[in-house]
Image (cartoon, rainbow, N blue to C red):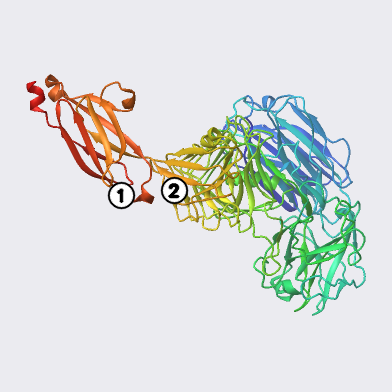
Amino acid sequence: MAKIRDSAVTIFSTATASMVCQMPTHQIGDLLLAFVSKVGTSAFTTPAGWTLIRSSISAGGAGGVYAFRATTTTTTVTFTLTSAACCASVVSVSGCAGATVATAITNSSLTLADDTSIPYSSGTLTTTQANSLVFSSMYAEVGVGIGPNPRWVNVTSVDTGTNTLGVAYSYVRTSGTVVTGTDWYPGALTTGVDGRAFMVQINDDGNETAIDPYIPLTTTPSTLLSVFTGIAAVDLGTWTAGNARTITTIGPKSTTSATGLSIVATTDSGYTPFRTVAQTPGVSSTTNLGHTEFVPTTSWNLTLNKGLFFATFRPASPRDYIDVGDIASGGIYVAFSNTAIAATPYRAWTVGGQFSETTIPDGRQNILIQVQQTSDTSYGASGTVNWASVAKIAVGSAGVYGAPAIQWTELYNLNEVNLAGGTHTNPLNELDIIKGINGGSGNIPLLQRSGAAITTWAPIKFGGVDPCRVGCNLITFQYPRKADEIDYADFHVDNDYVGYEFHGLSTDKFSFTNCTFTSQSPYYWRFNASHSASALVDFSGSTIVNATVTLQPTVSLSDVTFNRCGEIAEAGNTLTDCTFTNTRATATQGAVIISGASQAALQAELNNFVNCTFSNNTSSNAAIKILYTGSGNVALSMTSGNFSGNSKDIAWWAPAGNSLTLNYSGTANPTSTTSTNNNIVTLQSTKTFTINNIVANTEIRILKQSDLSVIAGAEDVGNTDPQAVNLVVSADTENSISGRYKAVYSYNFPVLNGGNNLPVFVVAHSLSQQWLRSSFTIKDLSESLQISQIPDRQYQNL
């Protein structure tokens, strides 16, 4: 399948007549695509050996797409042009159909007219082959880089200062699909451009060996609210300095008013070096806030998608961080209203502040707000905001120590981000995941990588729409800590509202070995109810920390540790060598729960825990909570499971009058129980006491030494007596002539007086042997006794 191998960017900010392009890594047979853009109304010259796919000249610039099938690994290309500022993006693509440009590209399109509206619209293309890699590109005479709308994965967004170039891709799996290319938004100081867009379909070679990460075009990962560059027409709204506002409840210190400030547009200061930002200049006051208000062209419906508001900000300089107030005095804040900020209704969140644990003095940082929080972490509110019709937003700060300038970039409404791509032989790694999710959600930093750790700022779904194959090892995936109104201010999201979901299709693969999923605040870690049993799943060696876990019967897990998670319901799936430890404190929880209305149903669920460990669940009700909804006493058996350090090992939740007997054997070692409704819970060990070397036709009895009562026994050991059907008899080859046999008698016994020892007599009686009595002490262990019977000479003489 066609896959991007590499890309390279070339920028000539000053005029040149010869654009020598930087080249991506490529192999023989790769398709090389050159997307080019320039200022001026003269065309590029097609380089020798290259094929022109599309070109255009608009009122203020020119651009095109050119292709070449690499015959060496050192291909170069130079574009000649009438001297002008220019830029290019060369992309190498492997896995293309055939060996020529003509077999790789049979379909492309061009917008028919200059596009001076915002957003800048791309054209459409109807795919002619299945599993197509489709590029959408735009050249424009605009000074700051353009970016793709969500769904399309960004490849290039660059500019020379006077013209720009954008390239993005997606995968379209069905032939005959009408595909609309991505809209492009400028991070620019202008209301319109001269430029056109191209679309190019790349045909695959029919071998699905590698697939780039992508967001299916049928999903909505995010919605752009405003590009926020400080120029009204570009921002899809207007800026208002306004007058002093009375905002009495932002921050615990109840700041009394806010001074309206004008916005400043600041070039090349966004989260990419080609984006402009909106900068609030700040005001120096120990009592007043200072903010700028923005009125959207059309009111925002923030209840759409997941209702998550995402943006980034940074102090314009470290000095501006020093000047800003702390969280208690208002800090850096965002406020929303249906009418006007400070008029009823409004709600405000502090998202940063001096000396907080989350605010970065010299870098750009993310903020995430669930505007309809259940557990409210906002700092100021009046009335009830209609989140389906937000008509004004304010961004600003408290300038307690000076006038802090704060820079703000694009505003987004986030949804669950659905990832696809990868193959079984070349699964997506952590870098691919970041590329697909960030590049496909609007080229915004939803995943932030530091070493082997990735901080996540949106709910992520693997698979479920298009095939998804992932292979990660030794990677940490984490969510930020929830805002607490004291030290943490950037993540205003309810517990369990975001998380990681796995929705495997029949051909999917999710391999996250030796990974860690974690957060200081609860999040979800779950498998979708429609997850296919045919999908390959491997989380061996991984640890899930502080999650609310949802399993499905189609998923079996091995060697996974669940640490400080919520109660986990057994879902009919097998859990082997898993560890459940430090379960989150809730009065009615267990580390795991099994439930059913019959003994058989409960036993089936209990059997799904194979050699699992339950440890240090001291704050929960029990390690295993058995929830019985039927009627009648229940007897269950457990053959494996290591219990240690739990407040209770087994909890029996059942209607009154329904007792539980739990027989355990093998490595299982539960010792403590609790129950509801005064029900009786009995633990019975099924350790085995084995008697060896028994002569055939021997009667065995085990008697308590204390009162000589018989606690077990069998007759005619070694024969077919119904009482001896579980006994094993083997021929004694050394004494086969005499007819002597060895036999084994095994007795499964209950736990003895809470594990105390039990002295017994083992009596063996046979007509051909002398009467034998052996003393033995049965312990709470599996043990054996070998007896030595002596032939009875009197019997033999008869």
Pair 1/2: label in front: 1
- The residue located at (12%, 21%) in the rendering is 738
Instruction: Inspect this view and state whether residue 635 appears.
Output: yes
Q: Where does the image place residue 359, in percent across and percent down from the top left?
A: 68, 67
Q: Please tell me how crowded label 2 is: few (under 14), some (14-19), or many (20+) other residues with Cα within 10 Å.
A: many
Residue 576 circle label: none
Name the amino acid, label 1.
Asn
Could you tell me which quadrant the N terminus lies in?
top right
For label 1, the residue is 757
Crowding at dot 1, Cα within 10 Å, few <14 / some 14-19 / many 20+, comes out as: some
**Residue 95 percent location from the top left of the image:** 61, 30
Choose top left, top right, bottom left or bottom right for residue 351: bottom right
Amino acid carrying label 2: it is Pro
Going 82% across and 58% down the picture, which residue do you hit? 229
Q: Secondary structure at mark 1?
A: loop
Task: Judge by depth and name the residue closer to the eye, 452 or 605.
Answer: 605
Residue 433's place in the image compared with 393, above or below, is: above
Q: Which residue is mark 2?
A: 670
Asked where in the image residue 375 lies, by quadrant, the reply is bottom right
Q: Is residue 678 left or right of residue 719?
A: right
Is residue 38 rendered to the left or right of residue 769?
right
Residue 324 visible, this angle: no
Q: Position of residue 24 (x, y in %)?
A: 61, 42
* Residue ID at (36%, 47%): 752
Residue 680, percent across and down?
A: 51, 47
The correct choice, above or below, for 390 with respect to 27 in the image is below
